[in-house]
């Protein structure tokens, strides 16, 4: 494929993608295929002679699409949301074209510097404490990881190194193996399975703290476990608090857990993979209170902030905790600027060496939506729509409601009033409201 064919095929592909997105509602959200469906449909070996692009694109509809679960269908309600937007897809195309592997500043300065600045932009959107921002001379800063699981693992490994060095400095005879044996990490029993997995990969014990009636980790349960384990000669070193758990979106009590971690000198990592995007709205920001106690914080813009997978945003207060834990400098990766102190070499912040130019996606999305657009996307609805719905309800005169204001939100009140009302009446009223709301949303779209 030469440049002129690429121009043509590229435009066709953009059309194909736009058609796919526009028509996705018409596709069955979950495929009909059985395991092993694909192998009989394609040759057993790669072709000796080249196929044409046409052959391939035809096979996409024949072979691939029938086996796709359509995550971006409006009928997809499984797992968790995965972000998608046109600006992000275009940025990904550019990322593919530049195709750099930005492991160090010198390996592509723009790749590193845009990432640092985008992570500061996003950190400011969340009103993260200053300590997490890189700024011009900060000790903290952000990095894009591939997934929340990776962020948790990186934090755990950094914490493991930190505590090991601290203990060895105090007792030089202590071996790493002797320390590892005693290290214990904690999360609530509602934490994502990736937290347990980080413990397995990191070779340390991970204990699940029983959550309370609201599925939140509380001070008393954590403190109790810490006391019991310390009495048994174990060494607590790492706590993961979850904001927005996978099962039910419960929130661990950061304002209780945070001070304990400070007092016990234990690394606190916050996993807000799903819910974190909401913190860009001031009305949801209080849910993040207590982040100031954390050593590291992570959430996935690739879930709910319109940046296509993969983009998992992780901040640390002390970048040296990461770079100190994972640094190796073979001569072929050295460059003349690296010791200037101003330079970020992101390979020291992550597990792999190579990394894509993922910050382009953030840059495109943040600029094309603006903070207001992103907030509106999280809120997904306005007082204007609610008012219009009320008008429709009261014009239809089938049921009758009055509204109220809850701070700056316009809310419809549904009071159960009559002595003779039964659940069937409530059901009918609900169906009626839903019908009118659907009509309204449709009219709004057109
Ligand atoms: C989705 C989710 C994860 C896993 O995220 P990955 O980026 O796929 O690793 C972890 N924790 C929570 C709370 C999540 O919602």
Image (cartoon, helix red, strand yellow):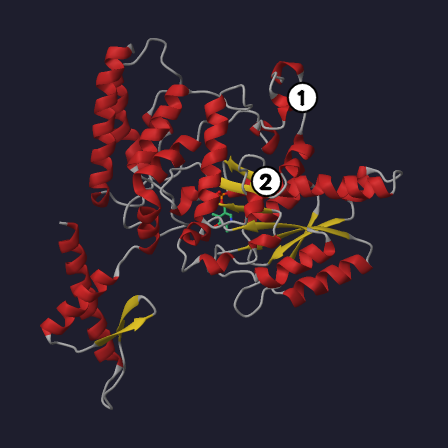
| Residue 422 quadrant | bottom left
Give the vertical position of 87 relative to 182 (above or below).
above
Q: Farthest residue in the bottom direction?
A: 419
Which of 175/391 is in front? 391
Quadrant for the N terminus, please. Answer: top left
| Residue 322 quadrant | top right
Q: CA distance from mark 2 to mark 1?
A: 21 Å
Q: Which mark is residue 98?
A: none
Residue behind mark 2: 140
Q: Are there few (<14), some (14-19), or many (20+) residues within 10 Å of tag 2? A: many
Quick check: can you spot residue 435? no
Mark 1 C-beta to ligand 1 under 8 Å? no
In-image side of 227 versus 278 (left or right): right
Q: Residue at x 62, y 37 (%)?
A: 319
| Residue 8 quadrant | top left
Residue 396 at what x, y percent from top left? 10, 72
Q: Residue at x 35, y 34 (%)?
A: 364
Give the vertical position of 368 relative to 40 (above or below).
below
Mark 2 C-beta to ligand 1 under 8 Å? no
Residue 150 at what x, y percent from top left? 56, 39
Which of 271/260 is in front? 260
Q: Number of numbered discs present? A: 2
Residue 338 at what x, y percent from top left? 62, 22
Q: Are there few (<14), some (14-19), or many (20+) residues within 10 Å of tag 1? A: few
Q: Residue at x 65, y 23 (%)?
A: 339
Secondary element at tag 1: loop
In-image side of 97 versus 173 (left or right): left
* Lower position in the chain sequence, tag 2 or tag 1: 2
Q: Which mark is residue 329?
A: 1
Secondary element at tag 2: loop
In-image side of 432 versus 73 (left or right): left
């Amino acid at each position: 494929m030469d440049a002129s064919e690429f121009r043509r095929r590229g435009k066709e592909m953009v059309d194909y993608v736009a058609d796919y997105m526009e028509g996705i509602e018409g596709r069955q959200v979950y495929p009909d295929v059985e395991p092993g469906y694909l192998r009989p449909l394609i040759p057993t070996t790669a072709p000796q002679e080249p196929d044409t692009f046409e052959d391939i694109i035809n096979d996409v509809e024949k072979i691939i699409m029938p086996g796709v679960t359509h995550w971006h269908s409006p009928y997809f309600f499984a797992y968790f949301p995965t972000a998608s937007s046109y600006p992000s897809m275009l940025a990904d195309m550019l990322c593919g074209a530049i195709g750099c592997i930005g492991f160090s500043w010198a390996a592509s300065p723009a790749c590193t510097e845009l990432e640092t600045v985008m992570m500061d932009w996003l950190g400011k959107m969340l009103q993260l404490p200053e300590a997490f921002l890189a700024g011009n001379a900060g000790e903290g800063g952000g990095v894009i990881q591939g997934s929340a699981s990776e962020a948790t693992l990186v934090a755990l490994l950094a914490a493991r190194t930190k505590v090991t060095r601290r203990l060895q400095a105090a007792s030089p005879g202590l071996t790493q193996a002797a320390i590892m044996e005693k290290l214990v990490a904690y999360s609530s029993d509602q934490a994502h399975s990736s937290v347990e997995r980080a413990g397995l990969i990191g070779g340390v014990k991970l204990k699940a703290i029983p959550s309370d009636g609201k599925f939140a980790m509380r001070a008393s349960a954590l403190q109790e476990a810490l006391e019991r384990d310390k009495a048994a000669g174990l060494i607590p070193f790492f706590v993961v608090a979850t904001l927005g758990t996978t099962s039910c979106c419960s929130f661990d009590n950061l304002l209780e857990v945070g001070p304990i971690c400070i007092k016990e000198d234990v690394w606190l990592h916050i996993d807000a993979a799903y819910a974190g995007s909401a913190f860009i709205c001031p009305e949801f920001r209080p849910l993040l209170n207590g982040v100031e106690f954390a050593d590291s914080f992570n959430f996935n813009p690739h879930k709910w902030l319109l940046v296509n997978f993969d983009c998992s945003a992780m901040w640390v207060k002390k970048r040296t905790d990461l770079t100190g834990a994972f640094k190796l400098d073979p001569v072929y990766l050295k460059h003349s600027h690296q010791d200037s102190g101003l330079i970020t070499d992101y390979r020291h912040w992550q597990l792999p060496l190579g990394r894509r130019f993922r910050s382009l996606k953030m840059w495109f999305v943040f600029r094309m939506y603006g903070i207001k657009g992103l907030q509106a996307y999280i809120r997904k609805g306005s007082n204007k729509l609610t008012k219009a719905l009320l008008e429709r309800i009261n014009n239809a005169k089938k049921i009758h409601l009055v509204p109220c204001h809850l701070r700056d939100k316009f809310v419809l009140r549904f009071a159960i009033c009559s002595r003779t009302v039964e659940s069937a009446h409530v059901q009918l009223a609900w169906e009626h409201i839903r019908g009118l709301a659907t009509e309204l949303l449709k009219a709004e779209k057109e």
